[in-house]
Amino acid sequence: MNIDINLILPEIFLSLSIMTLLMIGVFKKNSTSLIFNLSVLTLLILSALILNLSNIGETFIFNQSYVIDDFSNFMKILTAISTIFVMSVSADFLKSLNIYKIEYPILILCSLLGMMVMISSNDLIVFYLGLELQSLALYVLAAFNRDNILSTESGLKYFVLSALSSGLLLYGCSLIYGFTGSTNFIDISSNTYEVPYALTFGIVFILVGLAFKISAVPFHMWAPDVYQGSPTSVTMFFALIPKIAATCVFIRFLYVPFINMIDQWQMIIIFISIASMIFGAVAAIGQKNLKRLIAYSSIGHMGYSLAGIATGSIGGIQSSITYITIYVIMNLALFCCLFMLRRNNNYFENIDDLSGLSKNHPILSLSLLIILFSLAGIPPMAGFFAKFYVFMAVIEQSMYFLAIVGLLSTVIAAFYYLRIIKIIYFDPSKDKYDTNHSFGLKISLLVSTVFILFYFIYPNSLINIISKINII
């Protein structure tokens, strides 16, 4: 039992930290800043604890329902570090909306704990518990700005639709348990030969629930409204962190219990990938709100990530993990720029608000230029290499149609990214925005933009790290 406790020390530490921070927040008045700072410190210690578990090999605990390996540790560290950046840039924005409260960082930590459980789950029930812990916190975060009708509406929409998808997912879990007699991934994999066609129904229902969580077509309907209505700091969290955990679950769910049934699920993933890439590229063209545009953009990016998973190869999985890592960094940088569109304590989020930005804010405009080029997949930015690895993995498996659709959708999507650059550099300028931004916001933008710009110097860096991880 001592070994088990040591292996889940990061989860135990995070759980105890959440309860401690909640007690401090309740009993100590005006402690919001303290809770924020302690939350960031908690995340730094959490990252160190996870890093301490590296190179232990694949270890199953709690009757093989929970797995600790290099893959889960990498994804957990990625979620923890991404959350640190989200927290460090959120404070000023929350103060401006008068929602700078202790519940915000605590809810984010609760959601992160759920994601960590999801990432290490090797059992359908453990996975579902992690998913619901993550989702319950996200419901509240979406409606965190209670005085704003859009925020309340987005929280309600996300809750209703997410509850429906969770019901479908749980029904899929019950079908798989009914046909195989187990909820453990390893036990399920040994029983897939007996009832492969019956199990396909369960797989489909679970994939529906997972596709909803990453806002993949045709289960994307919540994303634009929730992204627009939620406070921008919450939208940032929605756009980055849950995507990491859901991608990890996609890989572990499809490649551990159901690798023998690749013929049954591969076409489903290919369809979702193609639909997401095409819809994400086309639907974003007419958008006027930057947060809605980011929502449709993220739908397209999830399509590229799923294309790698659909290959059924180790190279495809590695390309997907590389893609999601670079995607998180690119969107972190984009949201940092969005937070800088502030004037007299009011934040602007329409595309027209970027008009002539280069004349008053050349450095911010240059950052946006680099980020948007990267999102469009234009070389030599990091986004180009992310797409390159995915397309190479797809072509290696002779899935030429999927590669062609991906390339065409990249060309279409480039239009709305380049249109924003045209507005920034060639349209008439508007009033100057405030320049007194927090240190955390400036550092986050600097680090992410430098990574995007100079990634081409050593483009194999991420893929080399990920290739050393024993994923499945």
Image: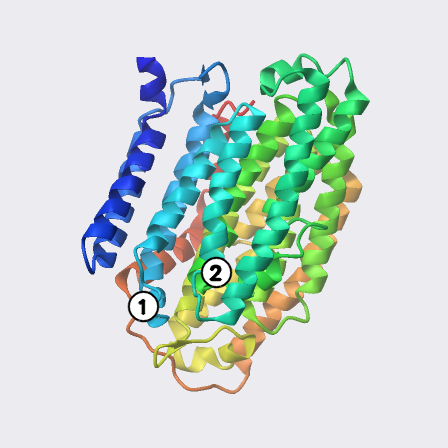
Mark 1: secondary structure: helix
State which quadrant residue 253 falls in: top right
Give x and y (percent) for residue 381. Answer: 51, 54
Q: How dense is the environment of label 2, judged by Cα within 10 Å: few (below 14), some, or many (20 and up)?
A: many
Question: Which quarter of the rendering shows the N terminus?
Answer: top left
Q: Earlier in the sequence, mark 2 or mark 1?
A: 1
Q: Is residue 468 above or below residue 240?
A: above
Residue drawn at (55%, 83%) of the image: 427
Residue drawn at (50%, 72%) of the image: 349
Q: Label 1 sits on what residue type?
A: Lys
- Residues 382 and 125: in front is 125
Give x and y (percent) for residue 193. Answer: 75, 14
Residue lying furthest left: 28
Residue position for label 2: 143
Residue drawn at (45%, 48%) of the image: 137
- Distance, label 2 to label 1, CA atoms, is 16 Å
State which quadrant residue 295 falls in: bottom right
Which circle marks residue 95 in the picture? 1
Asked whether the beta carbons under mark 2 and mark 1 sit within 8 Å of each other, the answer is no
Q: Looking at the image, can residue 13 be seen? A: yes
Which circle marks residue 471 in the picture? none
Give x and y (percent) for residue 262. Answer: 73, 26
Q: Looking at the image, can residue 259 be seen? A: no
Mark 2: secondary structure: loop
Name the front one of labels 2 and 1. Answer: 2
